[in-house]
Image (spheres, helix red, strand yellow):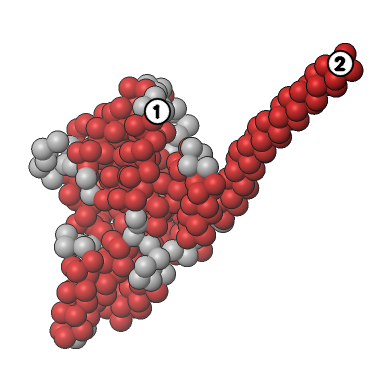
């Protein structure tokens, strides 16, 4: 009998041990699966970062989406996907990702800054200003946030507030070149070309190989009637970075120089560098609008009407770059 009691106890103990072992194996499997999901998400996130850094927003978005399929809580993948959506011109999708991130963690200034950028490119300057203001509240020494809010204020017609923000950015970071360039554009919009030249020179001195600053000075000099110097700036900018906006501004310059054939070629190049579906639609709209202006100068009215219509279909407010810039100095709009 004693033997049976001992045997029975050992059997019960063995069963308990086996049951415990099964529970541990199940627990380890869950941990492994969770780790696998996290690892899979990380791998796709890293692929997205690599493709994004190489300028392939389409593939980056697919990679970030795969990362989120593995782990919906991968906030880095969601944040980067929002930036990639903005780069591609899908502003509503970017804002949706950032809305979710902000609802989960409203303490991150980068989430507000990225949402503000998407809203500004979408044309919603009032919401962009509100988000940049929240960015500044969370990160009051962010020179970039002041600079970017200044841009939003300028586009809303609040030139005094824009100037104050650009100057605040320079006080926080005197070596920052962007506020100088933005002050130059603001001065040009207000026909103060002497001040604009000085601010442009500051920006270019700090970053002499920045094509965007040379391009913008080309526009400023075109507006001022300094065509020879403007052409030198645009030509140098194209050598550094062959992109659509520089060719577009060169087209306006050539129109001002009464060279419509060459202007048409510049706008054709601008359009070829901004094909449909690959960039935000205002790039195609402005290239088409410029091409229409050249066609009008060449008395090709039917072609011009076609391009004007196509441009306004893409962007009902489209105009030339100089006119767009002068909006900065226009009457203030409600915020």
Residue at the image point whose x is 32% and y is 44% from the top:
95
Above or below for 323 versus 255: above
Taking 88 as reference, is 306 above or below it?
below
Q: Which of 223 and 38 is in front in this view?
A: 38
The local secondary structure at tag 1 comes to: loop
Find the distance from the CA under tag 2 to the CA under tag 1.
67 Å
Residue 105's tag is 1
Q: Is mark 2 on a helix, strand or loop?
A: loop
Q: In which quarter of the image is the N terminus?
A: top right
Q: Mark 2 points at which residue?
A: 1
Tag nearer the camera, 2 or 1:
2
Q: Quadrant of residue 320?
A: bottom left
Q: Is 6 placed left or right of 332 in the picture?
A: right
Graded by Cα atoms within 10 Å as few (under 14), some (14 to 19) or many (20 or more), the crowding at tag 1 reads few
- Residue 272 in picture, x, y percent from top left: 40, 74
Q: Residue 92 carries which label?
A: none
The answer to whether any part of residue 178 appears in the image is yes
Question: Closer to the camera, 79 or 170?
Answer: 79
User: As drawn, which residue projects farthest toward the front?
Assistant: 1
- On the rendered structure, is 2 left or right of 35? right
Q: Earlier in the sequence, mark 2 or mark 1?
A: 2
Figure quadrant of residue 265: bottom left
The C terminus, quarter of image: top left
């Amino acid at each position: 009998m004693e033997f049976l009691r001992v045997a029975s106890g050992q059997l019960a103990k063995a069963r308990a041990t086996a049951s415990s072992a099964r529970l541990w194996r199940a627990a380890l499997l869950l941990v492994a699966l969770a780790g696998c999901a996290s690892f899979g998400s990380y791998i796709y996130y890293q692929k997205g970062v690599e493709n994004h850094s190489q300028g392939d927003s389409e593939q980056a978005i697919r990679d970030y989406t795969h990362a989120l399929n593995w782990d919906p809580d991968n906030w880095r993948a969601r944040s980067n996907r929002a930036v990639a959506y903005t780069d591609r011109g899908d502003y509503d999708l970017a804002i949706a990702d950032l809305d979710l991130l902000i609802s989960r963690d409203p303490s991150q200034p980068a989430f507000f800054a990225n949402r503000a950028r998407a809203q500004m490119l979408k044309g919603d300057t009032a919401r962009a200003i509100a988000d940049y203001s929240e960015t500044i509240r969370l990160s009051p020494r962010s020179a970039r946030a002041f600079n970017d809010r200044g841009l939003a204020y300028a586009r809303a017609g609040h030139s005094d507030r824009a100037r104050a923000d650009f100057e605040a950015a320079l006080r926080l970071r005197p070596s920052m070149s962007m506020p100088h360039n933005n002050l130059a554009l603001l001065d040009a919009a207000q026909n103060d070309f002497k001040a604009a030249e000085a601010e442009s020179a500051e920006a270019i001195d700090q970053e002499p190989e920045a094509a965007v600053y040379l391009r913008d000075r080309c526009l400023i000099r075109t507006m001022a009637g300094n065509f020879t110097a403007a052409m030198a700036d645009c030509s140098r900018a194209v050598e550094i970075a062959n992109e659509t906006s520089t060719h577009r501004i060169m087209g306006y310059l050539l129109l001002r120089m009464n060279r419509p054939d060459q202007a048409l070629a510049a706008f054709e190049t601008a359009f070829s560098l901004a094909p449909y579906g690959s960039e935000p639609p205002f790039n195609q709209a402005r290239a088409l609008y410029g091409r229409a202006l050249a066609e009008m100068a060449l008395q090709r009215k039917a072609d011009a009407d076609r391009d004007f219509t196509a441009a306004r279909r893409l962007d009902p407010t489209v105009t030339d770059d100089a006119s767009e810039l002068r909006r900065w100095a226009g009457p203030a709009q409600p915020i």
